[in-house]
Image: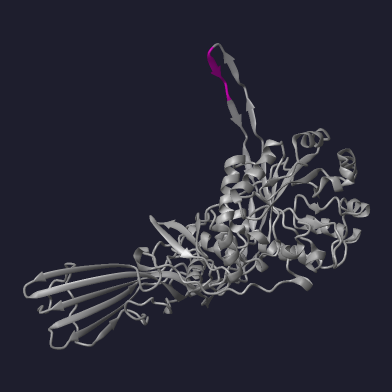
């Protein structure tokens, strides 16, 4: 936190450049079905796939049938018939004169069990008339439209080779081959298939106007060629079956609900050094906090593997007695993650309502240390204990920080990014838009952490503090917190309970940041984990290369999105419906490895990290 600001952010006048990275080789791994990437249908994209070879010999005839099926991306033009109905008018419908008269029931007598003398007389309905119904001008206009989309289909290549076989001989599959003149080609449609055995990229099919927009017709092309001097004839048939859009929908996303009594869902104030805050007078601290609507205090409980004595049970009991919440926060470095987890767990023993992990630049590239810390912490505090990450807000400048572990499954349930707009060198609206567009992909409730201290770049004022509160509400944040009590002036603390007006033409930014080919780092790792969770066979290496781009294109096509190969806001929204695939992290030398289990196979890859992160991580993680 304080004293680490030069490492925390990276924008404005002191914004570091995006770290330069180097390409990293992948381990040679044995993959299923001959492909690194598999689309959501469960097959591998590319020249691999499933190949079946059947050889039948009936002297002197030898028949060989080889069938290869691969999924391909096809550009399909769908012709839709548009129906327009115009000019229908109904006029002059009138119903008049309905009268019912003279209904009389007389003479009903019941004697014992006998009913006698029931008479109904005089029921008459008269004068019902309907006039003037006219329908004019009904017309139907058919307007063809031809939208184009990229879809996933399968391409089956069947090669039948007959050697020394008379015309009409049975093939290996039991059928009779079609005898054609040598070198001729018969095509069932105008489709031009890709090269035999290739990926099939670029195939196109144009159905007739009567074809419904929900499918495309099958296409088949057959080529027969002789082998001179050998007596063999090879018949190659390429078949693309009809494309039918998938009817399955993505599973419901995992919702992480914020409890009503969550200590983060309120105005909160951070305390770094208790003796330097109102001279350590906890009674005055509580009184001042309550006077300004502060309901939660976050007090430092540890630094690395050292516990701070200022956080203890008597302190927690006194704050609870004032009907306030109290949380512990711990600064971590990653050098001794197991010991740091033990220090963090002491907060629960002392009665803290939650724990906040202050992990910053020291953890960049340290995926093994982050994995160890989170695993050991959860073992000690349990899976439901409230934990938050107070991390670096601008993820795009800290690409090697393991957000996917700290905010991933079994990690922190809440995200409190350090949105210090003055320290970063930007405005309050911009710090919100940038932070949210990058942090929301990790699907954790965001509780903004604002700035109440002065630095070389300036100091906050009541207006900007009130604006921070107001914009946080516009982004539907359930609570905000402030750094920190000992640095804040009384006027600043008073402003934390105020709301300013929104800037003119202000609108919250709701789209997630876009990832494209060439990107590297933790956001790519997070995307790859979810692509694998959606059915792809993709290595998790943090490198948005050709394989990741192809997986994204396949995902977009199968979910009827615009096929761009980039993960934009709409793609993120659907992709995050799928659970991420667990990753086991390891390190050897200066190299970090990610291992996943897919379809019964362990797949290990080298993770693309920057040189600085690799060196820093290796120095720390070789100890674990």
Quadrant of the image occupied by residue 617: bottom right
Residue at the top extreme of this rendering:
112
**Percent of width and height locating residue 251:** 52, 53
Where 391 falls versus 16 (above or below)? above
Work out whether residue 378 or residue 546 is closer to the camera in this orientation and state it: 378
**Percent of width and height locating residue 148:** 51, 76
Color encoding of the figure: one colour
Say which residue appears at 55% left-offset and 19% top-offset: 116
Residue at the right extreme of this rendering:
491
**Percent of width and height locating residue 287:** 90, 40
Work out whether residue 118 or residue 431 is closer to the camera in this orientation and state it: 431
Left or right, 97 with reference to 322: left
* Observer able to see residue 506: yes
**Percent of width and height locating residue 118:** 58, 24
Q: Quadrant of the N terminus?
A: bottom right
* Observer able to see residue 91: no
Confirm whether the magenta stretch covers residue 572.
no
Work out whether residue 280 or residue 118 is closer to the camera in this orientation and state it: 280
Range of magenta residues = 113-118
Say which residue appears at 35% left-offset and 65% top-offset: 33
Where 169 falls versus 190 (above or below)? above
Work out whether residue 515 or residue 164 is closer to the camera in this orientation and state it: 515
Quadrant of the image occupied by residue 186: bottom left
- Number of labels in the image equals 0
Confirm whether the magenta stretch covers residue 116.
yes
Left or right, 551 with reference to 496: left
Where 521 falls versus 391 (above or below)? below
């Amino acid at each position: 936190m304080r004293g680490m600001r030069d490492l925390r952010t990276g924008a404005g006048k002191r914004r570091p450049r995006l770290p330069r990275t180097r390409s990293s080789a992948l381990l040679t791994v044995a993959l299923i079905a001959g492909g690194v990437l598999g689309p959501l249908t469960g097959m591998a994209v590319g020249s691999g796939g499933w190949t079946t070879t059947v050889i039948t010999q009936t002297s002197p005839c030898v028949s060989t049938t080889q069938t290869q099926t691969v999924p391909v991306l096809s550009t399909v033009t769908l012709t839709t018939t548009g129906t327009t109905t115009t000019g229908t008018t109904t006029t002059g419908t009138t119903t008049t004169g309905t009268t019912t008269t003279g209904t009389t029931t007389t003479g009903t007598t019941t004697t014992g069990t006998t009913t006698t003398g029931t008479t109904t007389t005089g029921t008459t309905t008269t004068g019902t008339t309907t006039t003037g119904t006219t329908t004019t001008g009904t017309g139907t206009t058919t307007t063809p439209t031809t939208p184009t989309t990229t879809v996933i289909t399968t391409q089956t290549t069947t090669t039948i080779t007959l050697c020394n076989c008379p015309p009409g001989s049975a093939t290996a599959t039991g059928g009779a081959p079609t005898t054609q003149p040598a070198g001729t080609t018969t095509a069932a449609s105008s489709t031009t298939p890709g090269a035999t055995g290739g990926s099939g990229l670029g195939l196109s099919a144009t159905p007739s106007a009567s074809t419904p927009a929900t499918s495309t017709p099958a296409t088949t092309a057959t080529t027969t060629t002789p082998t001179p001097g050998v007596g063999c004839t090879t018949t190659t048939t390429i078949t693309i079956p009809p494309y039918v859009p998938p009817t399955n929908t993505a599973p419901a996303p995992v919702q992480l609900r914020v409890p009503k009594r969550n200590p983060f869902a309120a105005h909160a104030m951070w305390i770094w050094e208790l003796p330097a805050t109102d001279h350590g007078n906890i009674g005055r601290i509580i009184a001042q906090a309550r006077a300004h609507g502060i309901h939660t205090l976050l007090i430092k409980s540890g630094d690395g593997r050292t516990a701070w004595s200022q956080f203890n049970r008597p302190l927690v009991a006194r704050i609870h007695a004032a009907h306030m919440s109290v949380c512990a926060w711990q600064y971590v470095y990653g050098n001794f993650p197991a010991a740091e987890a033990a220090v963090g767990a002491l907060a629960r023993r002392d009665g803290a309502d939650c724990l906040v992990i202050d992990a910053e630049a020291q953890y960049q590239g340290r995926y093994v240390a982050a994995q160890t810390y989170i695993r050991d912490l959860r073992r000690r505090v349990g899976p439901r204990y409230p934990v938050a990450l107070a991390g670096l807000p601008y993820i795009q400048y800290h690409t090697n920080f393991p957000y996917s572990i700290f905010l991933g499954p079994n990690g922190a349930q809440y995200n409190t990014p350090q949105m210090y707009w003055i320290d970063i060198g930007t405005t309050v609206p911009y710090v919100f838009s940038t932070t949210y567009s990058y942090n929301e992909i990790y699907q954790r409730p965001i509780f903004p952490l604002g700035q109440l201290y002065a630095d070389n770049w300036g100091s906050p004022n009541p207006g900007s503090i009130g604006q921070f509160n107001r914009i946080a509400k516009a982004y539907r944040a359930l609570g905000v917190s402030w750094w920190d009590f000992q640095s804040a002036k009384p006027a600043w603390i008073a402003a934390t309970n105020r709301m300013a007006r929104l800037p003119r033409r202000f609108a919250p930014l709701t789209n997630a940041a876009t990832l494209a080919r060439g990107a590297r780092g933790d956001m790519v790792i997070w995307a790859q984990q979810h692509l694998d969770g959606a059915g792809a066979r993709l290595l998790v290496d943090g490198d948005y290369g050709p394989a990741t781009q192809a997986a994204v294109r396949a995902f977009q096509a199968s979910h009827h999105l615009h096929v761009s190969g980039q993960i934009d806001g709409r793609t993120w929204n659907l992709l995050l419906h799928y659970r991420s695939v667990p990753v086991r992290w390891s390190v050897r030398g200066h190299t970090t490895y990610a291992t996943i289990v897919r379809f019964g196979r362990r797949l290990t890859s080298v993770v693309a990290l920057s040189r600085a992160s690799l060196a820093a991580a290796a120095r720390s993680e070789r100890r674990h």
